[in-house]
Amino acid sequence: MDRFDAMQAFARVVETGSFTKAAETLHMSRTTITQLVQQLEARLRVRLLNRTTRQVKVTADGAAYYARVIRLLADIDDAETSLSTAAAAPRGRLRIDVPAPFARLILVPALPGFQARYPDIQLDLGVSDRNVDLIDESVDCVIRGGQIADQSLIARHIGDLQAGLYAAPGYLARMGHPAHPADLENSAHRIVGYRRARGGGVLPYTLQRCDVSLTVHGQYLLAVDDGNAYLAAGVAGLGVLWLPEYMAAAHVAEGKLVRLFADWQLPPMPLHLAFPPNRHVSATLRAFIDWVGGIVADHAPVVRPPPG
């Protein structure tokens, strides 16, 4: 048994959920894939996969083994790349996780350019606003707005999101146009609440005008933990929104959202790229980091403090 082929076959079965699909992607026969996985299980003396006539499911042991195998395969691929002429053309697989609105509005539309430049890099893109465990889930890096709570991660400040307050015309016609941010507290006005993580509280926001600072909590009838759902709720007229400008721009242009309190400022939201400290920054990951940094700079350049 070739252990490398066996691990690769097992990983592909887990990822595709099928021996047949794994065989197709690896250009092997289904029989060969089956034999490799069986030999791997025999060597390890554990069952990695539960098979029925209708589906293949990874066992608990298999899931733990898979997490280690994909790291090992990535390291091997990176080692081969660094020792070959392919170092100038990175290749391999990256697992990335980004917020849903960032993926939909910025990252995915730009990916054809990335794939044209790096045709041998395969991206497994997780799209979520949840807190991803990079180690347990074998994620190479994440992009997140706000501060990175996990201080064990290496975080790089790649941009600053300018933000503002917005509401749908229908909401304003029904509830009236608030004259001051304080009108959102203890009144008939409602916000759409955003929760950073499941079970967490709704985030307040601080606005500033000249030397006056005001923190607004607001009252809500709906709170969500997904950026796309948050935006949709605001467009539907369910309350006032705090939005990065890149999320609001098209809806403002189409007349679906109206900017509020233009003379008040929200502090820019820092955008970070983070990865585990024990994760080697391979040529493949370096290529993605450099590329996405350029994409972010076009939409949300880092705000530099004034000199002096």
Image (spheres, rainbow, N blue to C red):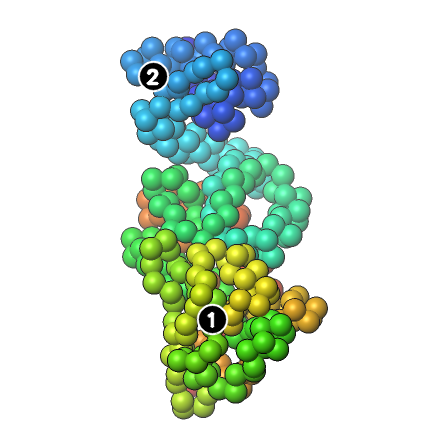
Which quadrant would the N terminus be assigned to in this image? top left
Q: Position of residue 257 (x, y in %)?
A: 62, 71
**Three-letter code for the amino acid on which mark 1 is drawn:** Ile
In this rendering, does residue 60 appear at all?
yes
Tell me the quarter of the picture where residue 297 sits. bottom right
Residue bearing the label numbered 1: 191
Secondary structure under the numbered disc 2 in the rendered image: loop
Q: Position of residue 95 (x, y in %)?
A: 47, 41
**Three-letter code for the amino acid on which mark 2 is drawn:** Arg
Q: Is residue 299 left or right of residue 194?
A: right
Mark 2 is surrounded, within 10 Å at the Cα level, by few (under 14), some (14 to 19) or many (20 or more) other residues, namely: some
Residue bearing the label numbered 2: 47
Front residue of 52/128: it is 52
Q: CA distance from mark 1 to mark 2?
A: 51 Å
Q: Position of residue 306 (x, y in %)?
A: 46, 82
Q: Using the image, determine if residue 205 lies above or below residue 105.
A: below
Front residue of 162/283: it is 162
In this rendering, does residue 294 appear at all?
no
Q: Position of residue 50 (x, y in %)?
A: 39, 18
Q: Using the image, determine if residue 198 lies above or below residue 145.
A: above
